[in-house]
Image (cartoon, grey):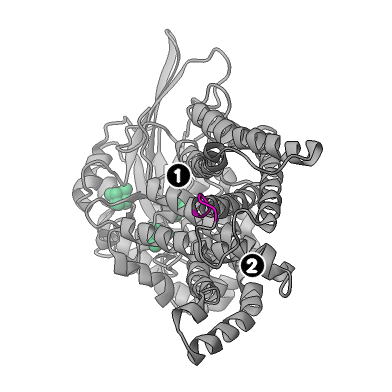
């Protein structure tokens, strides 16, 4: 997928779905159960309420935990010291010789039912109807951090420089220039794949349709749009008795996953 | 373990002060409505007056603290400029809360003004006219203030309880816990101020004197109400822990920080339960029973007299500390 064709597809897609009008949107809610079941159905069948829904697929079989995305994100968004928009957790488990290590890159899931949006008292955090991304209006945010508590993934933080809430914005400034997000761009194993999960012709839609995928903390009902292939659900808190598990979050401001 | 706390002391103190102010106002308003004419004047006037004066102060102080904490004070106006009707379709408890605070401060201040001794402040006909008007306004203002105060006390808990991602807060028991604690800290603040003012008999001109039997009677009622509230709070804390402990999910893990061996166990069991609830309950209960059972005069050493309400206030603050910090150092389990 070259940067150029990706954006061309989404633009074409956008025009097309505008033409389809409200009928396509109306069916979106009804078809909730059959999410991503068939690649060739119209986009509205995906069950997502937005016609265009940008998201990310992280193929953990290809992730080597190098933290290049963490660094690229930090440089791209000029994220201050001590906080991060994206990071990669390490999970070590088992005993030699039956031991393993897995990685879990984290970023904002740009949820379809985002709890951060519901609690925001000013409306600063909102969902963009045109692409389903969750963004923070820095001109409105008061920095109360209610959203940061509400997010079940702990991806929000107080930007120590601006004193407002901050998080991954899916590199909007890049994707609307036809580039992929910085973390996707830098990933040497191509573990991170960005695209419109509703567009049947997009790489991300096809991969989600063909592979067993999962999302994190699904029970919270936030309907994340960041998917993982090969997600390891091992956690220190839920390990079996006698099992060895060690989680290193590598998150700047929290040694714990919670 | 070092923890990164997003809501720290300003929030903890704010929740405590908001509860305290709401509690004091609720007690004052209820006393006024209980007995709007006649006897009220003698028996409970002081309680109602102190409650009315205490009411708005902590809430205003707490709010200033929070706004100051935000770093850019004028940004806080965004809570209101998003427009009034936004409140009805923005489900955010914090948005609702900011309107509550606004109305609370306005109405509680007007209510407090009706208790000022206008006749003494403004001599002549004007003072008398104002005094008469204030007295007429008192009950209607109390009708507005009591529900507002209770809503305020409940909101401080709903603010936390609305968040599923904080399992320690996300419990249907929290509003009960905070409301009971708010009323008992509000009442303690009233009793404490009353005791400071009446260290020397007849210290306040024109008010009820310490040697007045009516004063003792009202003090006796207040203290017994407080002991009942403490017992209620202990029961609700029991419910709170039981509810979390019986849940098979993150809430169960979260409540472990309060149970023996948990990070906040010492603060919780010593600060909240022992100092904040059991100690004052035993001390005050002892003197209450002495009066109730043995028929002694309701009179006790000054140090104990003052330390019991202080302990309750301390316990209230520690309760907010334990809940606010405990909610943040725990969270969803699993990935
Ligand atoms: S991951 Fe968190 S911050 Fe991002 S949209 Fe979902 S709830 Fe909001
Ligand atoms: S910190 Fe900003 S975006 Fe988050 S809830 Fe508060 S006002 Fe909304
Ligand atoms: S999409 Fe952009 S902001 Fe989000 S994690 Fe990747 S680099 Fe960071």
Is residue B108 toward the left or the right of residue B63 in the image?
A: right
Q: In the rendered structure, the residue with mark 2 lies on which chain?
A: B
Q: In the rendered structure, the residue with mark 1 lies on which chain?
A: A
Q: Helix or strand or loop: what does disc 1 sit on?
A: loop
Q: Quadrant of ligand 2?
A: bottom left
Q: Are marks 1 and 2 on the same chain?
A: no
Residue A99, image quadrant: top left
Q: Position of residue B117 (x, y in %)?
A: 51, 75
Q: Is residue B55 above or below residue B283?
A: below
Q: Give the labeled residue for mark 1.
A: A153
Closest to the observer, B196 or B176: B196
Which residue appears farthest toward the right when viewing the image? Answer: B293
Q: Position of residue B71 (x, y in %)?
A: 28, 59
Residue at 55% in and 83% down: B131
Question: In the rendered image, is residue A234 in sight?
Answer: no
- Magenta extent: B197-201
Closest to the observer, A167 or B281: B281
């Amino acid at each position: 997928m070259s940067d150029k064709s990706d954006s061309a597809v989404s633009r074409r897609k956008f025009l097309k779905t505008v033409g389809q009008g409200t009928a396509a949107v109306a069916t979106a809610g009804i078809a909730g159960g059959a999410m991503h079941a068939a690649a060739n159905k119209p986009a509205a069948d995906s069950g997502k309420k937005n016609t265009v829904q940008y998201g990310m697929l992280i193929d953990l079989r290809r992730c080597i935990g190098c933290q290049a995305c963490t660094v690229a994100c930090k440089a791209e968004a000029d994220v201050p010291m001590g906080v991060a928009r994206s990071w990669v957790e390490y999970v070590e488990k088992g005993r030699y010789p039956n031991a393993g290590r897995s990685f879990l890159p984290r970023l904002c899931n740009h949820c379809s039912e985002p709890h951060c949006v519901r609690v925001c008292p000013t409306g600063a955090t909102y969902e963009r109807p045109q692409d389903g991304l969750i963004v923070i209006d820095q001109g409105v945010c008061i920095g109360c951090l209610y959203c940061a508590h509400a997010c079940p993934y702990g991806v929000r933080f107080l930007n120590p420089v601006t004193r407002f809430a901050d998080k991954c914005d899916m590199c909007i400034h890049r994707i609307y220039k036809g580039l992929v997000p910085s973390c996707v761009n830098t990933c040497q194993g191509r573990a991170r794949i960005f695209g419109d999960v509703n567009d049947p012709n997009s790489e991300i839609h096809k991969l989600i349709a063909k592979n067993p995928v999962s999302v994190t903390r699904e029970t919270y009902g936030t309907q994340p749009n960041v998917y993982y292939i090969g997600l390891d659900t091992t956690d220190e808190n839920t390990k079996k008795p006698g099992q060895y598990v060690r989680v290193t979050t590598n998150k700047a401001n929290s040694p714990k996953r919670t | 373990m070092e923890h990164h706390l997003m809501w720290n002391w300003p929030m903890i103190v704010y929740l405590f002060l908001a509860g305290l102010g709401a509690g004091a106002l609720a007690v004052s308003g209820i006393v006024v409505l209980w007995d709007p004419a006649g006897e009220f004047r003698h028996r409970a006037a002081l309680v109602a007056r102190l409650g009315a004066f205490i009411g708005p102060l902590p809430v205003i102080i707490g709010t200033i603290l929070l706004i100051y904490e935000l770093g850019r004070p004028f940004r806080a106006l965004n809570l209101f400029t998003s427009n009034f009707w936004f409140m009805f379709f923005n489900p955010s408890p914090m948005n609702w809360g900011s309107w509550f605070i606004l109305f609370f401060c306005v109405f509680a201040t007007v209510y407090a003004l009706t208790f000022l001794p206008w006749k003494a402040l403004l001599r002549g006909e004007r003072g008398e006219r104002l005094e008469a008007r204030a007295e007429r306004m008192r009950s209607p203002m109390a009708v507005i203030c009591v529900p507002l105060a209770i809503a305020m006390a409940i909101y401080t808990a709903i603010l936390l309880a609305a968040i599923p991602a904080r399992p320690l807060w996300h419990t249907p028991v929290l509003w009960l816990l905070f409301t009971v604690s708010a009323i008992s800290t509000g009442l303690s603040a009233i009793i404490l101020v009353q005791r400071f003012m009446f260290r020397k008999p007849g210290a306040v001109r024109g008010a009820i004197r310490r040697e007045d039997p009516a004063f003792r009677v009202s003090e006796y009622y207040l203290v017994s109400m407080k002991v009942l509230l403490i017992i209620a709070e202990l029961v609700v804390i029991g419910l709170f822990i039981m509810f979390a402990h019986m849940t098979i999910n993150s809430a169960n893990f979260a409540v472990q920080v309060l149970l023996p061996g948990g990070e906040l166990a010492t603060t919780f069991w010593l600060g909240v339960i022992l100092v904040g609830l059991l100690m004052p309950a035993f001390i005050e209960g002892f003197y209450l029973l002495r009066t109730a059972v043995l028929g002694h005069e309701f009179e006790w050493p000054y140090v104990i007299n003052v330390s019991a309400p202080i302990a309750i206030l301390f316990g209230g603050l520690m309760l907010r500390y334990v809940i606010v910090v405990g909610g943040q150092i725990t969270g969803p389990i699993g990935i």
